[in-house]
């Protein structure tokens, strides 16, 4: 508790957490009020938090000499950082700061949870001593980050869809227009749908590459590229869901509510694969000999 | 007969080539995959009885959910996915042609825009075509009833993305089948100083030394003993007959004549001294038992099973300590009567235990052993090629969107022309909305064309 929290690593972690929390509040408020100054507060905080996080990971690596992503603390930290980084790229490219509050809030929760897994510095067990650790882990964690972004947009899609449907029902009886005015400031349903597709377009190739590099690593470390270990199979499950999403998206009749529900389930499966399997289900990936 | 066959075939194609059917098959494959994550695999039957209510554990065993990935269900589900994918590929993906170059109603296409441009129709068309060509579009011209049309296509080649993906899946399937057909794998445990012969390959491996390094680390939740290295120093004799020294480490397998050998585990073999009525029994003494092996005593219903090696016994409590380094070792033995376990006892190395009937044993010496896994898998290159194709196909599908622009130039007979521009893609209009807006804005401000909208 003494030296550790005074280290650069700890300081940057605190900066990141606070930036995300305040940024999340500002951007969620921006989502509801559309006061521009809230965006001008939230967006820089998102960038600052993200930079602090990458700084923290680098500081941790240089301080300890140990690749920092091999435990839940480090990997959750990268997960939060990549989610925010991917979101920032989307936000700049497609003007999406309105959704940033949700991304930051979820990232902050995962980051805070990751901090509870900080067990201090440990050298990696033999199976983790491989250059693959430097390739495979960032790839899968980045895929998870992209799916977090797709989750936020698919959830917004579904919220807008159901609110609109309810509103049309109300409007027929002469209902409120306030909500519809507010809704009209969000991207349209087709635009939200395209955003989900574009973020899955980042996540699915990354997940595929992550599974491939994982298999290449397993081939080297355990002798077989595929062993039906719970972590591998859970990743395959998520992969199948997003492959299904991609196919549903090719058909007009399923594109929309149907495909977006599948994207939501896909993200839940990702979290199950990421945390559920690590915490509840043991297997080769619990890294025991 | 032939007609019946044709209609059955048509019906099969109609069902199997349907995306909804394919996605349903993917869903079934997914659910079976998930069951294998949640239900622990390859446990002994009584483990399921202990984990689940009786009806559920019976169902798990009866449906082979205890080894689901090798069950008939799993094979069928993957087979249906492949069949559906192949059918769709032949029925829908391959026959798909580019839409013909025909005039369209510009204003009826959701993505459309009009510009007023100064110049003759010919000069304007030339300028627009030059603009699109220099931005990666492939231009073709047609004239319909005196109206001049230009068609601009981009990333048409990317339509093969689907084909690349579906082929990739088949290549991966072929690669995994090759292993089932021609490959093999196994494990072997070698005691230090011992030589084993691998049955499938005939290779001989002698274990010269085995080293492991364990670092004790103080963490917030207590002492953790972190292993940091396992390494087998071996002498290997392959097909050439020449003995070579090699080392096998985790993450650094060795290759003997195309079969790979991996460091998988380690343990201890225990040699016992056995006496009966105080006299050594040469036939039973000195044998090194591996974990799980049993020592039977002639004329006695009792036997002893070597259950576990305890590297460190806590001197204060007399209980096994978590330290895996050898420091005050003991052996846990299971006492059996007629093959049924009676109980367990922990015997420090070098001390004795009475089995009854005048039998006494002493665990004398612990010898390190290295667990080696080996595998010959001729499918690996195919699987790798398939995987890379899959990735390539996904990138093509997601990042190269085939699109077509329709450009119509109408002379307004006042020195200007009306340029109508519309766009379609193979994935509908929504996905191209933003790029289309950008394109129109760029076109409108481009110095060659300019606009007078
Ligand atoms: C379950 C069996 C499958 C069936 C029936 C099937 C069928 C199809 C069909 C009909 C299309 C064309 C859709 C269209 O553009 O109208 C398609 C597209 C595609 N398929 Fe499959 N497929 C299957 C499995 C797979 C698998 C396992 C993959 C692996 C990733 C895959 C990858 C793709 C890709 C990347 C596309 C292009 C999607 C797009 O344009 O957005 N397919 N599939």
Image (tube, coloured by chain):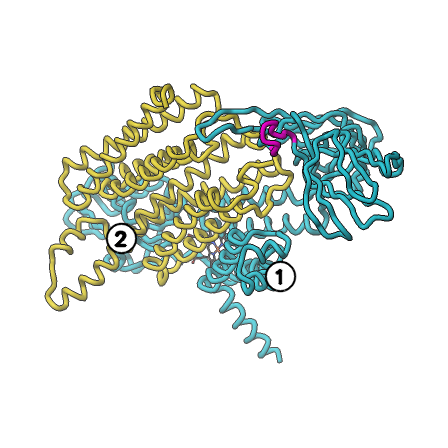
Chain colours: A yellow, B cyan
- In percent of the image, x 21 and y 51: which residue is there? B411
Q: Chain of mark 2?
A: B
- Give the numbered dot on residue B72: 1
Mark 2 or 1, nearer chain start = 1
Of labels 2 and 1, the one closer to you: 1
Residue B203 appears in view = no
| Residue stretch in magenta | B311-320
Residue B152, image x, y percentages: 35, 48
- B113, B328: nearer the viewer: B328
Tell me whether circle 2 and circle 1 mark residues in contact (CB < 8 Å): no
Residue A206, image x, y percentages: 45, 41
- In percent of the image, x 12 and y 63: which residue is there? A175
- Give the numbered dot on residue B111: 2
Q: Is residue B313 magenta?
A: yes
Residue B332, image x, y percentages: 68, 38
Q: Chain of mark 1?
A: B
Side of A182 relative to B433 (left or right): left
How crowded pointer 1 is (Cα within 10 Å; few <14, some 14-19, many 20+) is rated as: few
Res A83 quadrant in image: top left
Residue B35, image x, y percentages: 52, 56
Residue B339 appears in view = yes
Question: Tag 2, which secondary structure?
Answer: loop
The residues tagged by marks 2 and 1 sit, at their Cα atoms, a distance apart of: 50 Å
């Amino acid at each position: 508790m003494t030296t550790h929290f005074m280290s650069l690593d700890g300081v940057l972690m605190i900066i990141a957490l606070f930036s995300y929390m305040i940024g999340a509040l500002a951007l969620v408020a921006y989502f509801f009020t559309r006061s521009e100054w809230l965006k001008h507060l939230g967006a820089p905080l998102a960038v600052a938090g993200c930079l602090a996080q990458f700084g923290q990971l680098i500081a941790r690596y240089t301080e300890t000499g140990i690749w920092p992503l091999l435990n839940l603390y480090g990997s959750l930290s990268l997960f939060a950082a990549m989610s925010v980084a991917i979101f920032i790229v989307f936000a700049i490219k497609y003007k999406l700061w309105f959704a940033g509050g949700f991304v930051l809030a979820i990232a902050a929760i995962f980051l805070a949870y990751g901090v509870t897994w900080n067990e201090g510095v440990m050298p990696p067990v033999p199976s983790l001593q491989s250059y693959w650790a430097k390739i495979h882990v960032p790839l899968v964690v980045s895929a998870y980050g992209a799916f977090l972004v797709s989750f936020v947009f698919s959830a917004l899609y579904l919220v807008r869809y159901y609110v609109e449907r309810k509103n049309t029902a109300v409007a027929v009886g002469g209902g409120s227009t306030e909500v519809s005015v507010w809704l009209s400031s969000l991207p349209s349903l087709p635009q939200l749908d395209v955003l989900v597709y574009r973020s899955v377009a980042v996540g699915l190739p990354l997940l595929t590459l992550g599974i491939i590099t994982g298999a290449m690593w397993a081939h080297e470390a355990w002798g077989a590229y595929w062993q039906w270990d719970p972590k591998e199979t859970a990743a395959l499950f998520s992969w199948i869901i997003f492959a299904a999403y991609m196919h549903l998206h090719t058909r007009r009749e399923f594109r929309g509510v149907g495909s977006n529900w599948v994207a939501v389930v896909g993200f839940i499966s990702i979290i199950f694969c990421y945390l559920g399997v690590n915490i509840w289900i043991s297997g080769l990936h619990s890294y025991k000999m | 007969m032939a007609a019946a066959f044709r209609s059955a075939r048509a019906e099969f194609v109609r069902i199997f080539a349907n995306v909804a059917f394919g996605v349903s098959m993917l869903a079934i494959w997914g659910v079976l995959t998930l069951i294998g994550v949640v239900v622990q695999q390859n446990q002994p039957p009584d483990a399921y009885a202990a984990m689940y209510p009786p009806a559920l554990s019976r169902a798990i065993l009866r449906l082979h959910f205890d080894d689901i990935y090798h069950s008939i269900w799993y094979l069928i589900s993957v087979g249906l996915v492949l069949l559906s994918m192949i059918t769709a590929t032949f029925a829908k993906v391959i026959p798909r042609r580019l839409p013909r170059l025909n005039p369209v109603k510009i204003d009826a296409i959701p993505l459309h825009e009009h510009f007023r441009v100064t110049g003759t129709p010919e000069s304007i068309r030339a300028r627009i075509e030059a603009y699109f060509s220099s931005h990666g579009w492939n231009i073709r011209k047609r004239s319909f009833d005196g109206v001049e049309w230009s068609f601009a296509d981009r990333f048409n080649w990317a339509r093969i993305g689907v084909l690349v993906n579906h082929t990739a899946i088949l290549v991966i399937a072929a690669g995994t089948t090759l292993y089932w057909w021609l490959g093999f794998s196994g494990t072997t445990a070698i005691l230090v100083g011992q030589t084993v012969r691998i049955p499938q390959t005939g290779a001989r491996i002698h274990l010269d030394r085995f080293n492991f390094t364990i670092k004790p680390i103080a963490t917030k939740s207590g002492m953790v003993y972190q292993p940091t290295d396992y390494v087998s120093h071996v002498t290997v004799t392959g097909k050439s007959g020449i003995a070579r020294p090699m080392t096998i480490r985790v993450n650094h397998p060795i290759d003997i004549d195309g079969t790979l050998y991996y460091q998988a585990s380690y343990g201890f073999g225990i040699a016992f001294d056995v006496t009966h009525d105080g006299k050594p029994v040469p036939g039973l003494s000195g044998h090194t038992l591996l974990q799980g092996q049993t020592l039977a005593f002639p004329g006695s219903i009792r036997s002893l099973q070597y259950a576990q090696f305890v590297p460190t016994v806590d001197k204060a409590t007399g209980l096994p300590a978590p330290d895996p380094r050898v420091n005050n070792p003991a052996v846990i033995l299971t006492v059996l009567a007629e093959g049924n376990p009676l109980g367990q006892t922990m015997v420090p190395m070098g001390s004795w235990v009475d089995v009854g009937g005048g039998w006494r044993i002493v665990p004398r010496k612990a010898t390190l052993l290295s667990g080696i896994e080996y595998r010959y898998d001729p499918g690996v290159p195919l699987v790798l090629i398939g995987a890379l194709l899959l990735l390539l196909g996904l990138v093509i599908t997601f990042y190269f969107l085939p699109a077509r622009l329709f450009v119509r130039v109408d002379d307004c007979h006042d020195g200007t022309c009306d340029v109508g521009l519309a766009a379609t893609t193979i994935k509908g209009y929504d996905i191209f909305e933003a790029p289309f807006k950008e394109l129109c804005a760029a076109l409108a401000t481009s110095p060659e064309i300019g606009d007078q909208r």
